[in-house]
Image (tube, rainbow, N blue to C red):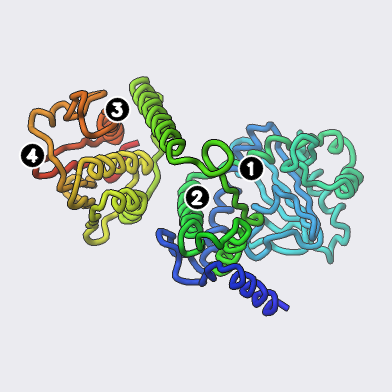
C-alpha cells in the first residue's frame, strides 16, 4: 500500500508539471541532517538537561512540591511527550510520571510508575508482580513523601495544561486518600512554561532547525519547484510535503501556501508598482532606523543583555555567507571566505558577533560598485582572540573620514547628493557591541583601494 501511495503521489506531481523533489542533494544552505540515531541521542541529552534543570526551577516557581502526569496509549498528555525518551516517545498502556521536590535544595526526584523503563530519565518505581494495582502503588508513593501541593494537568484555560483525561483524573483522585486528595491543585502555568521555555542548548540547536526550514522554504520558492504559468499553490503545498518526506522530516501540519499581491486586487500597473515599491522601501528604511536608535539607547542605558554560548567560528562564517549571497549576486560581485585550519570554538554572544560582522559585510557590498568582497577568520593564540575581517575592492575611505565613520549618524559622504543610502548608525552600533564583548573594530583603507574592517574579540568572553 505504501508503494502505491508513493507512486500516486509521484504521478500527481508529474501531472501537475511540478518538479519531483529528490531526497538528495540537500537544499542550498541547509545544514547536514544527522542520522535518526544521532538525532535520538541529541534529543535524549536535551531532555535530560530539561528534566534536571528546568523542572525543579519551574516547580519551585509554581510553589508545588509534587507534579503527577498520567497518559494512556493513543491519548497523550502534551506536557508528557517531551519528557519521554526517543525510544519510548509516547505513552505505553498507562504511563505515570511523578516529580517530587524534597526541599532544602536537594535534587527533584523523578519516578515512573509504569510497566516500561524510560532510558534512565526516570527511576522505575512499580513492580506489577509485587503490587498489581498501579493506582495503589502511586498512592503509596505519594503518602510516603507527604507533599504539600500536588499539581495535576487539568485546565479549562489552556489545552497545553489539560492533558489529564477525566477518567484518569477520577481514578487518581479515588486512589488518593485524605489529606493528599485535598492538596491537589491545577498545574496551570507550570505545564505551559515547561512546554514553552527553551534551554540555552535548545536555543542554539533551534537556530540550526530554523536554517533548515528556511533552506527548504527558499528551495520551494525557486525554479526547483515552480514552473511559471503551470504550478499552483496546491501543487507547491504537496511539493513541500514530498520534499520533507524525502528528507526524512515530519511536518507538524500540512504545508500551506498563500499568494498575496501588494496593492489593489488584480494585476498592478507599472506606475502603481513603482509607487508601492517606494512606499515599501521608505517603510523598511524607517523601521531599520528606529531599531538602530533603540539598540543605541539600550546599550547606553546598560540594558542590552549578553548571552554567552559556545559556537564554532566556521559555522558562523558559513551562515553569514549564506545570508549575504543574494545581495552579492544582485550587486554582481564575487564573494570569498577564508577560515584556515580548525579554530577553537568561541564562548561569547553569538548573536552580537553575527550582527557586527553582518553589518560589515553589508557595508562592503554597498560600497563596492564592482569587484569582490571577502570574509576571513583567524585565531590569535598569543592573546586568545578571534579576528573576523571583512575586505572589499570598493571605493575606499580617506584617513580623515576613517576617524568619523564610527560616530552616530555619520557617513564618509555626508553631502545631500551622496550616492549611498543609510542612516550612518551601523558602524556606531557595531563599535558599541564590540566593546561589550571586550573587543574592538579597526579599519584599513584608502580612496580607490578598498577597505578592510576587522573585529577583534576575546575568544572566551569574561563572565
Marked residue nearer the N-terminal end (4 or 2) = 2
Query: How far across and down, in percent of the image, does residue 295 sit?
Result: 37, 27
Give the labeled residue for mark 3: 423
Contact (CB < 8 A) between labels 4 and 1?
Answer: no
Residue 262 in sight in this render: yes
Please report the residue visible at 22 percent of the width from the left and 25 percent of the height from the top.
410
Marked residue nearer the N-terminal end (1 or 3) = 1
Query: How far across and down, in percent of the image, does residue 46 sit?
Result: 54, 53
In terms of secondary structure, where does tag 4 sit?
loop
Please report the residue visible at 86 percent of the width from the left and 38 percent of the height from the top.
181
Q: Marks 4 and 2, Cα distance to the nearest angstrom?
A: 42 Å
In terms of secondary structure, where does tag 1 sit?
helix
Task: Point out which mark residue 206 bears.
Answer: 2
Query: How far across and down, in percent of the image, does residue 337 sit?
Result: 24, 56
Q: Nearer the viewer, residue 339 or 194?
A: 339
Q: The N terminus appears in which quarter of the rendering?
A: bottom right
Q: Nearer the viewer, mark 2 or mark 3?
A: 3
Q: Nearer the viewer, residue 184 or 307?
A: 307
Task: Point out which mark residue 446 bears.
Answer: 4
Badge 2: few (under 14), some or many (20 or more) residues near its Cα, within 10 Å?
few
Q: Marks 4 and 3, Cα distance to the nearest angstrom?
A: 22 Å
Marked residue nearer the N-terminal end (4 or 1) = 1
Q: Is residue 98 left or right of residue 9?
A: right
Q: Marks 4 and 1, Cα distance to the nearest angstrom?
A: 55 Å
Amino acid at each position: 500500500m505504501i508503494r502505491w501511495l508513493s507512486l500516486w503521489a509521484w504521478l500527481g506531481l508529474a501531472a501537475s508539471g511540478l518538479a519531483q523533489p529528490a531526497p538528495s542533494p540537500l537544499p542550498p544552505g541547509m545544514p547536514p541532517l544527522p542520522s535518526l540515531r544521532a538525532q535520538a541521542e541529541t534529543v535524549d541529552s536535551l531532555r535530560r538537561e530539561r528534566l534536571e534543570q528546568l523542572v525543579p526551577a519551574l516547580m519551585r516557581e509554581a510553589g508545588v512540591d509534587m507534579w503527577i502526569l498520567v497518559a494512556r496509549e493513543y491519548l497523550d498528555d502534551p506536557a508528557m511527550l517531551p519528557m519521554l525518551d526517543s525510544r519510548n516517545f509516547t505513552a505505553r498502556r498507562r504511563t505515570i510520571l511523578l516529580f517530587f521536590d524534597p526541599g532544602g535544595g536537594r535534587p527533584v526526584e523523578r519516578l515512573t510508575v509504569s510497566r516500561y523503563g524510560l532510558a534512565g530519565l526516570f527511576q522505575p518505581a512499580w513492580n506489577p508482580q509485587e503490587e498489581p494495582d498501579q493506582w495503589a502503588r502511586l498512592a503509596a508513593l505519594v503518602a510516603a513523601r507527604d507533599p504539600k501541593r500536588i499539581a495535576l494537568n487539568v485546565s479549562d484555560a489552556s489545552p497545553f495544561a489539560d492533558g489529564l483525561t477525566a477518567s484518569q483524573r477520577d481514578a487518581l483522585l479515588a486512589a488518593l486518600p485524605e489529606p493528599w486528595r485535598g492538596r491537589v491543585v491545577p498545574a496551570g502555568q507550570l505545564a505551559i512554561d515547561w512546554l514553552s521555555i527553551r534551554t540555552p542548548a535548545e536555543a542554539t540547536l533551534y537556530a540550526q532547525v530554523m536554517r533548515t526550514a528556511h533552506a527548504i522554504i527558499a528551495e520551494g520558492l525557486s525554479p526547483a519547484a515552480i514552473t511559471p504559468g503551470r504550478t499552483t499553490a496546491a501543487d507547491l503545498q504537496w511539493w513541500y510535503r514530498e520534499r520533507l518526506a524525502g528528507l526524512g522530516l515530519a511536518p507538524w501540519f500540512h504545508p500551506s501556501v498563500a499568494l498575496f499581491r501588494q496593492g489593489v486586487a488584480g494585476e498592478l500597473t507599472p506606475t502603481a508598482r513603482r509607487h508601492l515599491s517606494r512606499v515599501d522601501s521608505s517603510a523598511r528604511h524607517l523601521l531599520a532606523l528606529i531599531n538602530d536608535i533603540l539598540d543605541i539607547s539600550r546599550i547606553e542605558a546598560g540594558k542590552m543583555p549578553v548571552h554567552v554560548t559556545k559556537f564554532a567560528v566556521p559555522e558562523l562564517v558559513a551562515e553569514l555567507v549564506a545570508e549575504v549571497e543574494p545581495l552579492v549576486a544582485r550587486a554582481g560581485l564575487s564573494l570569498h571566505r577564508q577560515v584556515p585550519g580548525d579554530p577553537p570554538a568561541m564562548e561569547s554572544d553569538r548573536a552580537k558577533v553575527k550582527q557586527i560582522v553582518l553589518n560589515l559585510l553589508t557595508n562592503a557590498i554597498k560600497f563596492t560598485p564592482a569587484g569582490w568582497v571577502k570574509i576571513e577568520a583567524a585565531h590569535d593564540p598569543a592573546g586568545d582572540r578571534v579576528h573576523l575581517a571583512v575586505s572589499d575592492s570598493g571605493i575606499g575611505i580617506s584617513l580623515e573620514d576613517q576617524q568619523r565613520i564610527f560616530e552616530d549618524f555619520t557617513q564618509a559622504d555626508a553631502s545631500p547628493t551622496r550616492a549611498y543610502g543609510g542612516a550612518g548608525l551601523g558602524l556606531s552600533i557595531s563599535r558599541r557591541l564590540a566593546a561589550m564583548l571586550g573587543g574592538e573594530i579597526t579599519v584599513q583603507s584608502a580612496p580607490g583601494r578598498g577597505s578592510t574592517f576587522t573585529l577583534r574579540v576575546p575568544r572566551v568572553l569574561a563572565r
